Image (cartoon, rainbow, N blue to C red):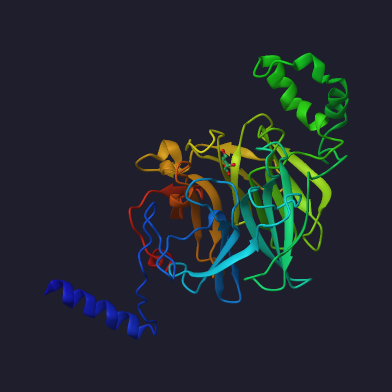
């Protein structure tokens, strides 16, 4: 009875304020998440684009027995972030040409899509590994579309920033780089090898052919400039690279972050002028402790913070690995998104979505919740 009375009071209060209570469906991190056809959403390592009042979730299609791409990049659309319509493979693999960059059986990971206000195009970047080459190629690939639901036209792949050194490298650092000789560091993980990695041993190795690019993220700043953030230098060092005005190539301006720090899975957002980045360590498909960095400018300096996760299994990112942070429209808040990988049954991988809270001093906190709703942001 007391319950009914309280609900009535709440309804009256909301009516008086002119707002209608919305019944949001629950979000249950780690559970099966059915789409409009009742099938578990198949969009892993993904990200969400908000465009013209709709959300578009792009991700890797995973099959039941392999993580290699047999279908391509998927898209789902939604008005409310909980009910998702399957829009199909918006960048399908190429079926009958094994020489194609995106031949069936290649690896297409961590796709992200951004909208270019100037060209009115939707631009997708993803991590590409060529068919039959394991993770050796370490390339970035780009595709473009006139519509958020595709089809995306595949443009090309590359290793970014060929021939370029980080723009913020000092004369002294460049001089040290000149002295590095790969032949002196055949053995990995020694203290002298680690020092040489920090100084740019692998950066120098890959200068001619372009820098390695695996786990990746895109970020569009308030001024419309876009950045590509990726694990480079054999996953040892993150790079933040500026994209051209049409978002289709790199300008050659970039920085290195946490040299030798072994960061993967970068997810970036901006709040009150501060850039925040959540990453993982490198343990294959196994979860590890999340890391967090912040900077006053995209170009740094980037400072490391403790693990932002709180709650059961917080020391292994609740069993997941970061993939994206969605900034909700209207500055309502941020959602942290992660993947719980299932390498033995890849299509059964799960999604962890959790609201980001901010402590009194403005530091992000990601607290585990078995279940929550979008009311959290009202
Ligand atoms: C961890 C990465 O974050 C994933 O995207 C994937 O590349 C796996 N490693 C492969 O082991």
Q: Does residue 99 show up?
A: yes
Image quarter hosting the C terminus: bottom left
Q: Position of residue 309 (x, y in %)?
A: 44, 43
Q: Residue at 57%, 34% (x, y): give it.
A: 282
Placement of 68 over or under 121, stated as above or below = above
Q: Nearer the viewer, residue 297 or 180?
A: 180
Placement of 88 over or under 190, stated as above or below = below
Judged from this view, the residue extending furthest toward the left is 1
Number of marks present in the image shown? 0
Q: Does residue 297 show up?
A: no
Q: Position of residue 150 (x, y in %)?
A: 66, 70
Quadrant of picture, ligand 1: top right
Q: Position of residue 179 (x, y in %)?
A: 87, 20
Judged from this view, the residue extending furthest toward the front is 96
Q: Residue at 48%, 41% (x, y): give it.
A: 343
Image quarter hosting the N terminus: bottom left
Q: Position of residue 153 (x, y in %)?
A: 74, 65
Placement of 84 over or under 257, stated as above or below = below
Q: Residue at 71%, 51% (x, y): give it.
A: 228
């Amino acid at each position: 009875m007391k319950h009914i009375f309280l609900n009535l009071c709440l309804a009256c209060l909301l009516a008086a304020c002119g707002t209608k209570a919305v019944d949001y469906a629950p979000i249950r991190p780690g559970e099966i998440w059915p789409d409009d056809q009742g099938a578990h959403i198949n969009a892993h390592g993904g990200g969400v684009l908000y465009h013209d009042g709709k959300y578009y979730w792009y991700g890797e299609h995973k099959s039941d027995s392999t993580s290699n791409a047999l279908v391509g990049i998927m898209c789902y659309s939604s008005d409310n972030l909980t009910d998702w319509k399957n829009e199909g493979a918006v960048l399908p693999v190429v079926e009958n040409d094994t020489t194609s960059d995106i031949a069936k059986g290649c690896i297409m990971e961590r796709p992200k899509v951004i909208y270019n206000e100037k060209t009115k195009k939707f631009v997708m970047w993803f991590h590409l590994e060529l068919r039959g080459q394991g993770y050796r190629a370490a390339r970035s690939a780009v595709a473009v579309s006139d519509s958020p639901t595709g089809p995306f036209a595949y443009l090309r792949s590359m290793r970014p920033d060929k021939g370029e050194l980080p723009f913020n490298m000092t004369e002294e650092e460049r001089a040290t780089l000149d002295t590095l000789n790969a032949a002196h560091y055949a053995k990995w993980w020694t203290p002298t090898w680690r020092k040489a990695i920090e100084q740019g041993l692998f950066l120098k190795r890959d200068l001619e052919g372009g820098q390695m690019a695996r786990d990746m993220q895109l970020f569009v700043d308030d001024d419309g400039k876009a950045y590509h953030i990726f694990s480079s230098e054999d996953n040892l060092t993150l790079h933040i690279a500026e994209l051209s005005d049409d978002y289709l190539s790199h300008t050659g301006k970039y920085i290195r972050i946490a040299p030798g720090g072994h960061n993967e899975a970068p997810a970036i957002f901006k709040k009150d002028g501060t850039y925040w980045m959540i990453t993982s360590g490198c343990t294959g498909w196994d979860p590890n402790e999340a890391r967090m960095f912040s900077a006053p400018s995209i170009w740094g300096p980037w400072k490391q913070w403790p693990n932002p996760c709180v709650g059961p299994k917080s020391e292994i990112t609740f069993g997941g690995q970061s993939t994206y942070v969605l900034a909700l429209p209207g500055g309502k808040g941020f959602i942290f998104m992660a993947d719980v990988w299932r390498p033995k049954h890849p299509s059964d991988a799960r999604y962890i979505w959790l609201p980001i809270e901010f402590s009194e001093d403005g530091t992000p906190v990601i607290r585990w919740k078995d279940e929550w709703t979008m009311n959290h942001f009202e």
